[in-house]
Image (spheres, helix red, strand yellow):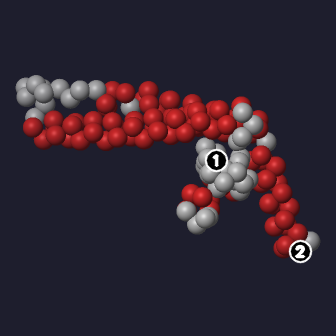
Amino acid sequence: ETARARLTARRDELSKLSADPETARARLTARRDELSKLSSISAQDRDAVELDQQSVGRLSRMDAMQRQAMAQAQERARTVELARLDQAMRRLEDGEYGWCATCGEKIAAARLDVDPAAAVCVECASGSKS
């Protein structure tokens, strides 16, 4: 078997895997569940920082405030990703999943493997299509 034949077979395999609605749904749902779990785990870090100087020293309080700010930023990023996942699920339900929302061309299987919530093809995402 030639290298070209193996590469073609691998591309066909990836194409089938990414285009399969049930596989896409499972991947999107798994990522959504993972983000929800991470959000629950970090909820305490996002809570207000205790300002009682008797229980927490100045540097410890500053560390806690930094940890809180980082946890809040991570939560904002998770919220954005959850919205992208919801949009991808809607595209899946509407039969539009895997098609570029900008140009209407098929999104490459490799792109969907890397980012199952991708709404646009690589060319449109990079701005190289005119």
Q: Which residue position is annotated with label 1?
A: 101
Tell me the residue at 55%/39% (across/down). Answer: 84
Quarter containing the C terminus = bottom right
Where is residue 61 shown, x and y percent of the image?
Answer: 16, 35
The residue that appears at 75% across and 37% down in the rendered structure is: 95
- The quadrant where residue 75 appears: top left
* Label 2, residues with CA under 10 Å away: few <14, some 14-19, many ≥20: few
Q: Which residue is mark 2?
A: 2
Observer-nearest of 90 and 56: 90
Q: Position of residue 59 (x, y in %)?
A: 13, 41
Residue 39 % position (x, y): 44, 31
Q: Is residue 19 visible?
A: yes
Q: Secondary structure at mark 2?
A: loop
Which is closer to the viewer, label 1 or label 2?
1
**Do tag 1 and tag 2 residues touch (Cβ < 8 Å)?**
no
Position of residue 22 measured from the top left corner of the image (x, y, whole percent):
76, 35
80 relative to 54, above or below? below
Q: Residue furthest left?
A: 54
